[in-house]
Structures are given as C-alpha cells and as structure tokens.
Amino acid sequence: MTEDRCLGYLPGMDHNESPVLEALAEYHERDYANYSPPGHKQGRGVDDAVRRVLGAEVFRSDVLATGGLDDRQSGKKVLARAQELMADAVGAEHAFFSTCGSSLSVKSAMMAVAAPGETMLVGRDAHKSVIAGLVLTGIQPVWVRPRWDRELHLAHPPSPAAFEDAFSNNPDAVGALVTSPSPYGTCSDLKTIAEICHRHGKPLIVDEAWGAHLPFHDELPTWAMDAGADVCVVSVHKMGAGFEQGSVFHLQGDLIDPVRLKESADLLSTTSPNVLLYAAMDGWRRQMVLHGHELLGSALKLAHATRREIDSLPGLRVFEDRLVAKEASHDLDRLQIMIDTLDAGISGYQAADWLRQEPAINVGLSDHRRILAQFSFADDQERADRLVSALADLTRTSLPSPQSVVLPEPRDLELEQVMSPREAFFAAHDVVPVDESIGRIAAEQVTPYPPGIPAILPGECISAGVIDYLRSGTEATMPIPDAADPTVKTLRVVKA
Ligand SMILES: Cc1ncc(COP(=O)(O)O)c(C=O)c1O
C-alpha cells in the first residue's frame, strides 16, 4: 500500500482517518450526560446478567447518531465524511451506509430506478428481499432465467445473452437487476451485462450482498462498480468486518439520481440507526484500504490450500473450475468453498447438522447435496485445520441414508408469473392443502433459506414439480421460514 493510496483518490481524502470511530472516542472523552435515548444511558441501566454476556463496551458505544455522536445539525459531518471515504476507497461516486442490511439497500436501489407499474429485468435467482421490493413498489418483473446445471443440480447466473433477449422483448424495461456473487460465490458476467444495459440507455443494479470485499483484491471477481454497474449494494457483515445488518450502497454515473436514491432509503429506513454499525463499517474501510490487499491475499492462499485438502478427503468434492466452465458461471469467489457431499452418501443438511452438533462448527449454507464453508480474512491456519479435521471425522462417521429431495426438470421449477407479485400478495386468499394448490396462483413467497432464493413467488402459477421439490425438501429438513405454514402442508393462494 503506497502513501498516495492511503491519501485516497480524491483530494482531501485520508484513509488513515476514521470519522465515526474518532467521533465516538471524542464522545467518550467528553463524558456526555444524556437525557435522551437510548434508555440504557450507555449501559448505566443495564441488568448485570445482560452486561455479563454482552459486555459493557457494547452499551457504552450505543449512542444517538444525531444529537449524540454528531451535533443536532450533524454539523461535524461525521457520517457524511465516513461515506465519502468509503466511496473513495472503492472508486464509487457516492456511498450510503445502511443499518438495515442489503435487504433495505436493494429495495432502495429498485425504488430509485423504477416507479409502480414500470417493468424491470430481474434475474430469477434473486434474494427474497428483491421480491419484497417488487411487492412494496409494484414494479413489474420480467424474469431472466438462470442456467441450470443438470450435473451439479445448481443454477448458474443468467447469461448476458439472456439479458440482451429480455431487453429486445421488453424495450420498455427501465433497468436490470442482477445478483452477483450468488450465495454460493458464483458470479455473473457483470461487465457484459452492464454494456448491454447501457447500450439500451438503462441502469444496472447489482445485488452484491456477498461481495463487500471484492474491491480490495484483484484476484477476487470484478466488483460491480469496476464492471460498470450504476448502483450496487453490499452487506459489509457478510464478507467484511461489519456488524450484522451493516450494508452500503454505492452509486456512479448519471442514470440514477443520488437524491432519489437517498430519499428512497430514507422512506424505508429506521430513524434510529445503530452507531456501532456505522463505526464498524468505517473502521473496516480503513482496514481494507491500509491492509486489505495483504489480508485478502493471505485468506485466498489459505482457502486455496484448504480446498485441496478437503477435496482429497474420501467422498467430499470441492468444485472450482467446474463452476466456471463454458455455459456456467462467469467467475467464482474462491473464499467460498463449496463442498459436495453426494459421493459421501449424505446430504448437505446432515453434514451441517453433524458439524454443528459434534465439533461445534457452523457452515454458511447447506442444501440437499452440499455445504459451503465461507472463509474471510479473519480465518487462519488453525481455523482451517479445525475445519479439515472435522470434515475428515465426518467422512469416517456413519450417518443414515439421507431423505432424497425430488429435483424436477428446470421447466417444472420455472413457474409462470400470471399476476404481479404486489397484486397477488395483497389479493384475498384461500389457505389450501398443498396438493390443491397446484394450478392455483400463489399469494405468498416460499423460500428455502439459505440460500434465500424463493421457489414460489406471489403471482406465480404453482406447478406439481415445485410442490414435489418443497414437500420432499421439508422432509429432508430444508428450512422454509417465510411460508405462512413452514411445514408447507398448506399454501396461501389467490382466492378463486
Ligand atoms: C443475494 C443476497 N441479497 C441480499 C441479501 C440480504 O442481505 P442482508 O442480510 O444484509 O439484509 C442476502 C442475504 O443473505 C443475499 O444472499
């Protein structure tokens, strides 16, 4: 890292600074007495039993953002300055911090691009928060289908050609929304998709919830702003060092009005943002600018060696090149180690449960035939060894045969959108036994979580194939937390 880089791209930017942390330190030094929220008054009123578990420092730094950390007019521009530094660090024109996760940021981005009734091209591998955005805004989706890998039973992101076709068939579409990386770490060809969007004069939104770290190392997949996206949202808590819910949206170019984006976020946001979240995001930006290349380089090396070790265990396969082959994903975040358990004769659900119960290891994602171990710059050799040794023990453990999950042909899982998600969500509904839902219009969203990509959306016509998949999935312990009936014995459908 050169001295210039620490000073930032733009004049006046010094990445050694950390405005939120500095303001918090000053706040503590002044020893303010607050006659304002939060009611715990920096921990004075907190029950000892709570303090013992959470620690005093958490409450000490839980202060009001305006009229606490900064003055009542935000005159010191603490947050504004932290956001400017974040934008400068990653080469965006604007960055906005959010304390409501990418779930909020992605909805704000959608509202900044489209109005109710307008159409947007959306990759169907979208996270459930995008669907919530469609319900809230009344934007009409034109679905762009992912590519189904029959061998791996995995959806690769939609191709650029699919977006080109979608624009040709829907010239009125006001923009496109792509999810990349996917929760599995696979990536779209964002550069080509951005070029296609711009050729049509339309903005590209990228849900890059899994990609907060991408700007800070050149061996990671291209990050959305570098690929030419107009707005992208990242969850700093996923692959960065933010607290849970810390998210940033980044903006560049002139296709999206920054004021409209800010107003959209304001409509959806809390008026009581947690300063701890701002502080962690601000500190993480400084850490990444000063040391990110080195830290992420080491993490990539560690993940590379760990992949090899896991792949050599009997019955476990780690996919890498296979995921970025022709007609597959464009790129892969190699910190995400996808471990296929099929040959070990167990499901990913069984592997995840055993790892949690026995060696006390939690993995990021599990499905019918794989688990995902997510590495970050916080991992080291000792933690990698712990994972490999636990997986070696798993391969020596005899577990019952897994419940099989019925995986229908892709066409049976690609449901037809016959009503808008918003109309269907707000329509009068019937609750019907799941068998009777086939052929009816869904009034709810049904999402295996993780990865969080809905199998059924409000407004889609329910197929027998998707019901087989969900029924066999729940029997195999697939969690479906958002369905009105999480056992999926009944479904909410639009009243006939
Ligand atoms: C692709 C994708 N987008 C958005 C989100 C929402 O992010 P957050 O949990 O920060 O609200 C997630 C969460 O898992 C996700 O996987």
Image (cartoon, grey):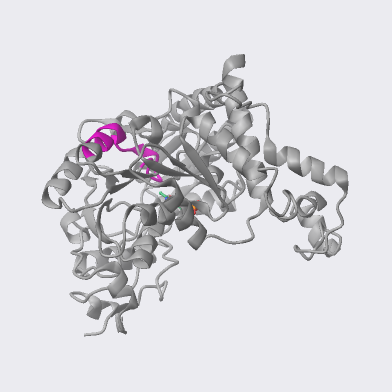
Res. 123 in view: yes
Placement of 156 over or under 289, stated as above or below: below
Q: Position of residue 435 (x, y in %)?
A: 24, 78
- The quarter holding residue 294 reads top right
- The quarter holding residue 440 reads bottom left
Placement of 33 over or under 175, stated as above or below: below
Q: Is residue 195 magenta?
A: yes
Highlighted range, magenta? 180-196
Q: Position of residue 253 (x, y in %)?
A: 37, 37
Left of 173 or right of it: where is 44? right
Image point (19%, 54%), residue name: 410
Placement of 327 over or under 435, stated as above or below: above
**Nearer to us in this view, 467 or 342:** 467
Quarter containing the C terminus: bottom left
Placement of 475 over or under 170, stated as above or below: below
Q: Position of residue 313 (x, y in %)?
A: 44, 33
Q: Residue at the top extreme? A: 2
Q: Is residue 396 magenta?
A: no
Image point (56%, 36%), residue name: 84
Image point (75%, 63%), residue name: 37
Quarter containing the N terminus: top right
